[in-house]
Structure formats: C-alpha cells, structure tokens
Image: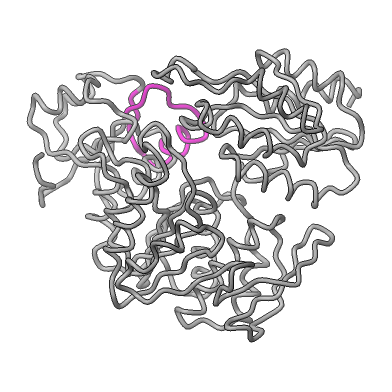
Amino acid sequence: MPKIPSNIKHIHLIAVGGTGMGSLAGMLMEKGFVVTGSDQNIYPPMSTELEALGILLMSGYSADNLKKKPDLVIVGNAVSKTNPEVLEMQRQNLPYCSMPEALSHFFMRNNRSIVVAGTHGKTTTTAIISHFLLEMDSDPSYLVGGVLQGNQKNYRQGSGPYFVIEGDEYDTAFFDKGPKFLHYKPYYTLVTSLEFDHADIYRDLDHLTGSFVRLLEIGDPKGFVLACTHYPRLMEIIGKSYAAVETYGTENNPQWKAGRFSFEEGKTIFDILYHNRLEIRMESPLPGRHNILNVLAAFACLRKLGFKAERIQEALKTFKGIKRRQEVLGVVGDIAVIDDFAHHPTAVAETIDAVKKKYPGKKLIAVFEPRSNTSKRAVFQKDYAAAFAGADQVILADVFMPEKVTDGKILDVERLAQDISDNGTPARHISGVPSIVSHIARNTPSPAVILIMSNGGFGGIHQKVFEALKKQVGA
C-alpha cells in the first residue's frame, strides 16, 4: 500500500456518509484540505452538514469520481475491494489509507490520546469525557462515534494536550483486518466492558479478547488504564498492560466505586468513592445503571488527569447526551416515543431497565429490530429471551437482510417471541414496518412508553409511529 504522502492538497473519502467518515471529512476540511466524498446513499442530516462545510459530495460509487486524481484516498471500512472507486484508485496507483490511519496521521501525532474501548458504553463515555475537558477549558480534540444532542458537532480540533477518541474493536478496512483502536496510540485507555460481539468477524469471545489484549499491550507505560470490574474476561487480561491499571464499577471491589443510588425526578444520584473514601455525591441527568458506570469511568479519568471533583460535578449538569441513546422523539397524550441504539442483549436489558426507572407507572412496549451483524445471527438466541424480561410487551421485527448471514444461522424471531412469552412477557413477531406501526397505534395503552431499539434506520418507523399515534388520539 502506498504511504501517505507529505504534499497533500486534495483528499477523497469513499463512503463519506457514515458518522465517523463524515466527521473526519469535516476535520480535514477545517485543517485546510480540499475534500471530496462519495457514498451509495447520502442523505440528511449528514449530507446537509457536509455540503455546508463546502465538501463536494458524489452520489454512488464510480471510477469517474476519481477523475480529478486526489492526492490521497481514505477508504471506509464498509467498502469492499471490488468497489469501482477502489479498483480505479488501484489502477491509478493513488495513495490510500483507512479512516483510523488518517485520524492518527493528521490529528493525533502531538496529543495524548484518551482511547475509550469496550463492547458497551464507549460512545457515551467518550462524549462525557470530551464534554468534561471542554468545560474545564482544556481545549480538547475529540471524535465521538455518535451525534451529540444540542446541535453540537461530534468532533473538535483543539490546541490542548488531549485527543479523546472512541476505540472501536471492529476491523479497519478490507486491506487491514486488525481492529480500529490499534491505530490510535493510546496514552490513556478506558475499557468499559468486554463481552462477545461482532460475530461476523470474531469467532468467539477468546478471539475478541485477543484484540483487547493487543490494545492493552500497546498503551503508553507513562499513561494509565481504567477497566470495569463487571466483566470477568477483562479482569483476566488487565495484567497485560504496561501502564498502571485502576478499576471501577459497582461490584467486585473496584478502586473507583459507585454506590448508594437513588433515581428521582429524571436524575440519578450516587456516591463516588476512591479506595472506599467518599469523593463526591454525584448528580447525573443520565438515567440507568449503565450510565452510572459511564459517568464513573469519565469521572475517574478526569480525576486521574488532575481535575477537581467539584468541577467535574458541575460540568456533568450541562451534558445533553447522545442522540439515539434513550432519545425522546416526542410525546402524544401520555405516550412517549423513545429511540435507542441498543442491539446487544446486555444493552437491551440495561436500556429497558433505565427506561422503566425513568417512567415509573407507565407500560413499556419494547420494539426491537435484529439488524446488527451479530443480532441477526442465532448466537444470542437464548440471551435475548432473558434480555426483554423488564418490558411489559415486546414486538419483534423481521431480521434485517438475513441473506447477509452466509452460514444460515439466523436468529429465529418466531421462536424468540415464544421464549419471551414463556418467560412471562407477552411478545409477538410482526413482519413489516407498516404492520408494526398499525399494531402500536391500535393497541398501545395510556400511559405508556414505546421504546424502539435498532442500530439502523428501521424503515423510518420512529416518525411513522409518532404520526400514527397522533391520528389515533386526534392530536
């Protein structure tokens, strides 16, 4: 593969429409490069955001998109080696790299990187740490793998010493099958969790754990590692780190511990202790026990960087959260419609628990689309049956693009609905978004919360449910 040249003016991104690639395009534009990009489907809000930055967008992949011969091509990880632009890039012998390589090369050379990795919670934890550093006047750089609430960009280039980055364990590109986080030169590393995921690229938990071992091994010995005690495999491997390790959690004797929880008036209140000495009584706007861990990780990180507990507490009050993380899309009468990115069984269970606590006394209807490369597979067939136990009703959609599961071991949605029902929670499989929307509009009691969980667009179901409910109640 050609090396990244030094005299670059024009950079082209293949698959620019994703959150990470679109953010990288914006960062490169702000750095002074001429930036172009292509994608199969570019639509708002990413399309409008990129166009507003002056980035030329090309719809569809074509060799013609490289006619102007860019100085560097950045290839997204969803792009295959048979993509027409990839073939043309190679025919012209253009220099190319992956998104993580570009981030490391252009933005992370002179910073101490704070890499947030883990199966769950990394997007929210990355966002909280970034927000804290911003509120502390540290002028941080960051890239969050989700859209921030409050019209804030999910990336920033600052002049301060820290670059906060979400460290994804997924593979980097068709020409680099190693995990993305290995490119980020971690100075400080946070590992929020370690459970099996990404069944399309990892054989089993041992295979996945090997990637996290490599992450720990490359961390700067002068930095530190923070690891959550809730995950046995993570605790088994933290000794691989050459940096100092501290632990956090609510159980298994962590050094940083959260306890004495209370959930009231949309707030989560809890103590944070360090070596069993009280640091502060924390008040968080984020619901759920999983968000206690996210806040605790961010708090411990900031304290280890030398910031005062009281300032961190104040900074948390202004954190607005991440879109698609328990995001309230609207309320019709006494029925709230909530969107969430949850797709792993643990995340589904935690999200349901958090929403139940936030809306006591309301029926919770959980609507789930098996869409991620892991959730559409049968690997979590039994785990999902338990994950939905906290809901009052469950609606399961069809598996999204089941033909992508080449070994034929597809999640059996009918069987899952029966298993959930056998466990005491009424569940049904309904095919097609129109039928799901119609069922919800006709059968949702009031007061209720409709929690829609998918890691994709789910056929625009969110707005369709909202509109159907408005018609049903005459709003």
- Is residue 43 located in the magenta-colored stretch of the structure? yes
Asked if the stretch drawn in magenta spans residue 21, the answer is: no
Q: Nearer the viewer, residue 71 or 115?
A: 115
Q: In the picture provided, is 11 more to the left or to the right than 453?
A: left
Image position of 311 with respect to 76: above or below: below
In front here: 75 or 445?
Answer: 445
Is residue 443 toward the left or the right of residue 217 in the image?
right
- The number of numbered discs placed on residues in the rendered structure image is 0
- Which quadrant is home to the C terminus? top right
> Which residue is painted at 46% across and 69% down in the image?
226
What x and y, as percent, mark residue 451?
73, 36
Query: What's the coloring here?
Result: one colour
Q: Position of residue 317 (x, y in %)?
A: 68, 67
Residue 235 higher or lower than 93, as above or below: below
x, y (%) of residue 78?
34, 31
Residue 214, quarter of the rendered image = bottom left
Q: Quadrant of residue 15?
A: top left
**In which quadrant of the rendered view does residue 198 lie?**
top left
Query: Which of the two residues, 44 or 302, is positioned nearer the viewer here?
Result: 302
Q: Nearer the viewer, residue 16 or 385?
A: 385
Q: Which quadrant of the figure contains the N terminus?
A: top left
**3 lies above or below 87:** below
Seen in the picture, residue 358 relative to 269 is either above or below; the reply is above
User: Which segment is the magenta one?
Assistant: 38-58
Residue at image x 32%, y 28%? 38
Residue 167 in the figure: left or right of residue 98: right
The structure residue drawn at horizontal position 61% and vertical position 71%, both measured from the top left corner, is: 315
Residue shown at 11%/34% (left/top)? Answer: 94
Percent x, y for residue 274? 58, 81
